[in-house]
Amino acid sequence: MPVQDRTNEFRACVESIRNRSSLPSRNAEAKQRLLNGNAKRGDKSEFSRMAAAIGKDISSTTVKLGKLAQLAKRKTLFDDRPVEISELTHIIKQDIANINRQIASLQSYVKQRQGQAAKSPAAKQVEEHNNNVVMLLQSKLANTSMTFKDVLEIRTQNMKESRDRQEQFTHATAAAANPAPSNSLLFGNRQPDPMGDGSLGRSSMKGKGRAHQNGDLLALDLGSAEEGMGGQNDGGAFMQMQLVEQQDTYIQQRSTAIETVEATIAELGQIFTQLAQMVAEQRETVQRIDADTVDIASNVSGAQRELLKYYASISSNRWLMLKIFGVLIVFFLIFILVS
Amino acid sequence: MKIYSLAVVLVPHTGASTILAHASDLSSFSFYQRGSVGEFMTFFSKTVAERTPQGQRQSVQENNYVAHVYNRGGAEQLAGVIITDQEYPVRPAFSLLTKVLDDFTAKVPQSSFGNTSAISFGELNAYLQKYQDPRQADAIMKVQQELDETKIILHKTIESVLQRGEKLDSLVDRSNALSAQSKMFYKTAKKQNSCCVIM
């Protein structure tokens, strides 16, 4: 629900009540209050305009998200429109980032106004209202982001399932020959990693090692499954046993894991080299500082020497000054006596 | 990620298979379920071991259990089965199986494969407990983990070196300014001396 500006309705109510109650003494104050409301409307409508814009953006993003969810839920085998979906995902991501920025600017605007606002109770209510509106918008944005994330998860699951089913129908050898496609960024994020732990970030795309993670699904071995079912006297639920052959996969997983370790060690070596280089650069700076400090020391000691000399000359000069004054007084006396 | 059970199965070419050694960790199930779950595990292990051709590895998924089987065949016709949950990484599971089978063949002579009760392979339990956390137990994963930690530490080090660089830069500027000022100080002091010689 976007933020609506219902000031006009409020004023209409006030007018009608005023006409009904018809107390002329209240007229002046009411007019005063309305005028105040009018004056502040400039600032308030600025805020409400921004908030309304953000609300509109959020609702349009929600609509797009609904469309994406519908697209992602489709379980058809061949008419999967990855281009549209990835485009839509990209657009929605940009929208969410945009709205985030707008909300942040709105919040800073509110804070700025809080700093300048008067401390009257009316202003406090306005502040509270602004804060509430900002929080409402933030929570709506958070909901939208959560829905977006869910839709992305559904999408990855469906993609996996559809690929499994595709490989059921195309035969096993073909599946083993062509590597698993990593078409959209979604699937790229959920790649299985050779270690099984969370350290996804480092492993680069080593084609063959990665490909066979998912490319080893055979067609369901229905024959042996059926005779297995016939053998059991279990009339209960049908146990689907998916037989997956992993002979090659295991060895390749091992080799991938070791290659990853090797890559990590190489990376570490690089980091060390970088570190050494940075420290070497800083050594030159340190040498400059050193030279500067030595200069400072020599300058200051030289200055101190000069000052000492000056002081010594001043203190020893007193006798000279007395002599000079004595000569001046003698000349002065001579001139007085002559005149 | 947990291991539920670990078993060594004798899989002759003809006839039924028998479990030679078995260890399980059913602590995550409620007390009353443990019996039936344990039976299910043994049955599952035997079935899956029988269905795996010799010299092959397989992974079978059922509800939320995954069984990894490695049928080594060979002279002893042994197979190792490990039942885990779905999160457990696949590769260390198979390395664990290989290790267990090697140990078993080293320790238990083939002659005693006939009577199951005589075989005591206590290391199974030890392995089960140790491999509950594969990252610590599996060699490659441990190395990888340590390398990652080292990398994080190195990143922090580089950041602090960068900060040190910034501080050194500011130090250079300040020492430059101080040097200029001390030079001015010296010159002024010298000027004092030379200027007023008269008095």
Image: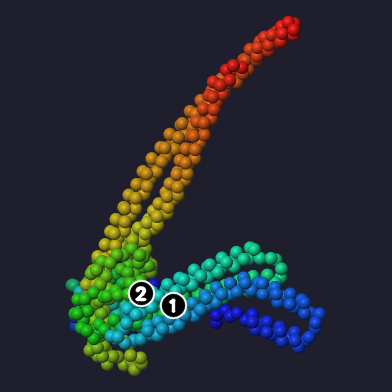
Q: Amino acid at mark 1?
A: Phe
Please give the name of the residue rendered at 42% of the width and 76% of the height, measured from the top-left corner.
A92
Q: Position of residue A247 (x, y in %)?
A: 22, 74
Please give the name of the residue rendered at 51% of the width and 27% of the height, measured from the top-left corner.
B187
Q: Name the image quarter holding residue A257.
A: bottom left
In depth, the one of A281 and A247 nearer the eye is A281
Q: Amino acid at mark 2?
A: Leu
**Residue A184: numbered disc:** none
Q: Name the image quarter holding residue A280.
A: top left
Disc 2 packing (10 Å; few <14; some 14–19; many ≥20): some
Please give the name of the residue rendered at 43% of the width and 34% of the height, measured from the top-left corner.
A291
Q: Is residue B59 visible?
A: yes
From the viewer's perspective, tell me whether residue A211 is left or right of residue A185: left
Q: Position of residue A140 (x, y in %)?
A: 52, 77
Q: Position of residue B199 (x, y in %)?
A: 61, 17
Q: Is residue B63 above or below residue B55?
A: below
Q: Position of residue A218 (x, y in %)?
A: 24, 81
**Residue A186: numbered disc:** 2
**Sequence-earlier tag: 1 or 2:** 1
Q: Is residue B43 visible?
A: no
Element marked by disc 1: helix
Q: CA distance from mark 1 to mark 2?
A: 12 Å
Please give the name of the residue rendered at 72% of the width and 8% of the height, measured from the top-left corner.
A335
From the viewer's perspective, tell me whether residue A307 is left or right of residue B26: right
Q: Give the residue furthest to the bottom.
A: A235
Residues beneath discs 1 and 2 located on the same chain: yes
Q: Is residue A28 above or below residue A119?
A: below
Disc 1 packing (10 Å; few <14; some 14–19; many ≥20): many
In the picture of the structure, the residue carrying the numbered disc 1 is: A148
Element marked by disc 2: helix
